[in-house]
């Protein structure tokens, strides 16, 4: 959902658990600079999946889960208004 002036919402990542191509659906209410990171359980950034401006509307960002070891990760979206994160299990 949207909170504290956040102009972006992160919908449910699917499929989750993931094993191949994985969709991270983002909805933005204005053009927004974002950085989408994949983090491990220790909070370390494994990869920056996307960095740049996304237009207002819905955008799907794709992650190839087969590039990573199986385990529990977090997808984090950083914006000026704050961060959103969601758990992702890779099998």
Image (cartoon, rainbow, N blue to C red):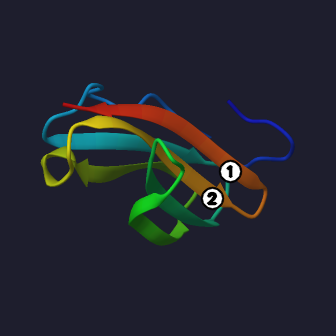
* Label 2: element kind: strand
Q: Is residue 16 left or right of residue 4?
A: left
Rendered view: 33 above or below 28: below
Q: Is residue 59 left or right of residue 8?
A: left
First-in-chain label (1 vs 2): 2
Residue holding disc 1: 83
| Image quadrant where one finds the C terminus | top left
- Rate crowding at label 1 as few (under 14), some (14 to 19) or many (20 or more) other CA atoms within 10 Å: some
Residue occupying image coordinates x 46% and y 45% = 75
Residue 81: percent from left, percent from top: 79, 56
Provide residue 21's location: percent of width, then percent of height: 17, 44
Q: Residue drawn at (44%, 28%), measured in percent from left and top? A: 12
Q: Is residue 32 above or below residue 40?
A: below
Q: Which residue is mark 2?
A: 78
Relative vertical location of residue 33 with respect to residue 23 in this rendering, above or below: below
Classed neighbour count for the residue bearing mark 2: other residues with Cα under 10 Å, few (<14), some (14–19), many (≥20)? some
Q: In the rendered image, is residue 8 in sight?
A: no
Residue 90 in the image: above or below residue 39: above
Mark 1 and mark 2 residues within 8 Å of each other at the beta carbon: yes
The residue positioned farthest toward the bottom in the image shown = 52
């Amino acid at each position: 959902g949207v909170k504290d002036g956040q102009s972006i919402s992160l919908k449910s990542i699917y499929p989750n658990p993931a094993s191949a191509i994985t969709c991270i659906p983002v909805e933005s209410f204005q053009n927004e600079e974002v950085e989408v990171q994949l983090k491990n359980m220790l909070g370390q950034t494994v990869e920056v999946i996307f960095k740049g401006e996304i237009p207002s509307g819905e955008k799907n960002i794709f992650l190839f889960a087969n590039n990573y070891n199986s385990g529990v990760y977090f997808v984090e979206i950083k914006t000026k208004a704050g961060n959103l994160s969601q758990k992702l299990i890779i099998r």
